Amino acid sequence: MRQSQLFANTLREAPAEAEVTSHRLLLRAGFIRQLAAGIYIFMPLGLRVLQNVERILRDELERAGANELLMPALQPTELWKESGRYDVYGPELIRLTDRHHREFALGPTHEEVVTMLMKNEINSYRQLPVTVYQIQTKFRDERRPRSGLLRGREFLMKDAYSFDTTWDGLNRSYRAMYDAYHRIFERCGLTFRAVEADAGAIGGEGGTHEFMALADIGEDTIAVCTHCGYSANIEKAISREECFETEGNTIPKYDKIHTPGVHTIKELTEYLKIKPVNVMKTLIYLADGNPVAVIVRGDHEVNEIKVKNALGAETLTLSETETTESVTGAKTGFAGPIGLSIPLLVDKVVIRMKWGITGANESEYHIKNVVPGRDFSVEHVGDFRNVKEDEACSRCEEGKLRLVKGIEVGHVFKLGTKYSEALKARYLDANGKEQPIIMGCYGIGVSRIVSAIVEQYHDERGIVWPPAIAPYRVHLIPVSIRDDMQRKIAEDLYDALRQIGIDVLLDDRDERAGVKFNDSDLIGLPIRIVVGKDAIHGKVEYVERSENNKQLLSVEEVVMRINTGDKFR
C-alpha cells in the first residue's frame, strides 16, 4: 500500500477523554475513530489488525475441529425469557420492538440462539460431538463505556459452543478449546495467564477459566502463586490462611463501649488503639431484595461474588443507609452480628478469632470481647472475602500469592445442561432415550485483544506491533520522494518485497523526514527501511521497531533478511 493512498490521519494529541495508553495511541495513530461513547469505527489500519487476529483465530479453531457459522445479531427476547436470563442481564441487554410490537434484543452473546439451532438440527447421538463458532459484532449497553476498545457498547467477539453426549466428552471439548486459546494468545504475542474464574451471568455447572492479558490498567485483579501454577481471578481465589488469632484464653462476657464519632475501621482502631485484625466487620447487603449480614475480619474485604454464589442469589447489592439503619437500629458504621434477626454469613477466618470487637447495633457504641459461636450464630460459615497479597497458596506449601492486574481477553465455560434443559435441546441416545445435550461455550474479545496488545507493546514514541498482528510488516520510507535515486530504490524494494508475499507500506508522501519518522514510530510496524543519503552507495537503513538497532544493508541483504527471518514469518 502506498501511504499517499492510505486513509489514515495521525494526531499530535489524543482527545482528553482518552485515559488509557491503548486508547490514546490507537486514536493518535489513526487505527480507530469514535462515533459515540463506546462505539468505534475501525479505520483501514485498525481493520487490518483485526483481520490478522481473526486469521489466527480461524487457523487455531479449525485445528481444534470447530466449524464456523454466522448467527443473527437480532434475537427474539422470548429465547432470553425461556432461558431465564432476560432479567439477569438487566439494562445491559439492548432491547427494541419491531413494527408488529414483537420485542427483540441485540445479542451480547448467543447461548440461547445456538441452543435453539442445535435443538432443531440434532436428533441422534451419532451427530455429536460438534463445535461451532462465529466472529461477530456484539452489543451491551454498558453503563459507563470507558478505556476505548476495552469497555465498549459494540465490540467484535469470537464465541464458540461445543455440544456433547457426556461430561467426559465436554471435558475433551473444553480441553481442546483451552489449548487452542493458549496457541491463539501466544501467536498474538500476548503475555497472559489462564486463571480460575466465576461464571457470572453465563452460568453453568462446571469449571471456567478466564484468559488474562497482564497489564497495569486491567480491571481484573488476579492472584498468582510465586511457586506453582495456581492462578485465579480475585472473585474466585482462595488462600491457605495463616490466620492471626487474637490472644486470650478465658474471654469474659462481651461488654459495650462508647465510641463517639467512630464510623470506619481506621477510626475505630485509632480510637481504641487496636489492630484491624481484632475487629469483626459487619456489612449489610440485599440479596434479591432480602437483607443479609456478612461478617469478615477488619483487615479483609467482602468478596461479593462469593457471597452471591453462596446464597444462590440473582442480585447482591450493599444496602443503602436507610435499610442498614432499619435492620440494625443504628447509624451506618455501628452494625454488628449480635442480636441481628437476618441471616449471618460468617467468614471462616472470623471463626478462628478467639474474640473481637464489633458494632453494637447502637449509634456511638461498639462491643468488645465478642466470641463467634458464643455470642452470635455461626450457622452459615464460608469463604466470603478477597485474598490478600503474600497469603499462602492453597495449592502448594512453598508459594505465596501475588496480586496482579489483567485484561480479560478470553473466557471458557463448562455449561453442562443449563441451556439445553431450559430450551429443551435433546438428542436420542443409543437406547432411543431422550437426553439433554451437554454444552460448553468459549469467548474471545477480538477487538479487546487489539487494545491489550497495545497496552503490552508500546514505548514513549508509539505502538510496537508484534509481527503476526501488525497491519503491515514493513514500513518503507524514502527520505525525499523527490530524489530520483531514493525513489527508484524504494520502488524496487517495494516490488521485490511484495513479490515474496511481504505486506509493505511505502511512505511516498511529499513530507518532511521528521513527519515521516514520527508517523512511523506512532504506527509501529515491525520493520522500518529508510532510503536516504546512503542510497548513492546502494545502501539502505534497516531498523526493527522493537529494538531500534540501525544497520546499513544492501537491497539484496534486506530482501534476504526479511524473507528468511523466522520471527517475521
Image: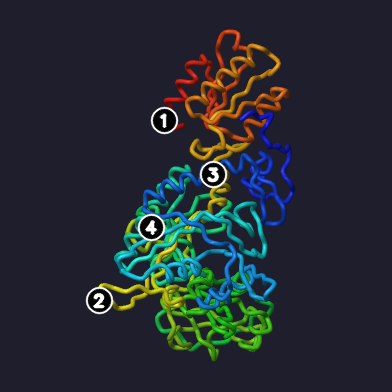
In which quarter of the view is residue 3 placed? top right
x 61%, y 61%: residue: 139
Q: Are marks 4 and 2 in contact (CB under 8 Å)?
A: no
Q: Which residue is the site of mark 2?
A: 431
Residue 140 rendering spot, x and y as whole percentages:
61, 63
Residue 319 rendering spot, x and y as whole percentages:
62, 79
Given this view, does label 4 or label 3 mark the residue nearer the observer? 3
Tag shown at residue 566: 1
In terms of sequence position, does the residue under pointer 1 or pointer 2 come before the other? 2
Question: What whole-number distance in Å separates the C-alpha atoms at marks 1 and 3?
Answer: 21 Å
Tag shown at residue 230: 4
The residue type indicated by label 4 comes to Tyr
Asked whether the viewer can see residue 188, the reply is yes
Question: What whole-number distance in Å separates the C-alpha atoms at marks 4 and 1?
Answer: 33 Å
Q: Which residue is the site of mark 3?
A: 51
Given this view, does label 1 or label 3 mark the residue nearer the observer? 3
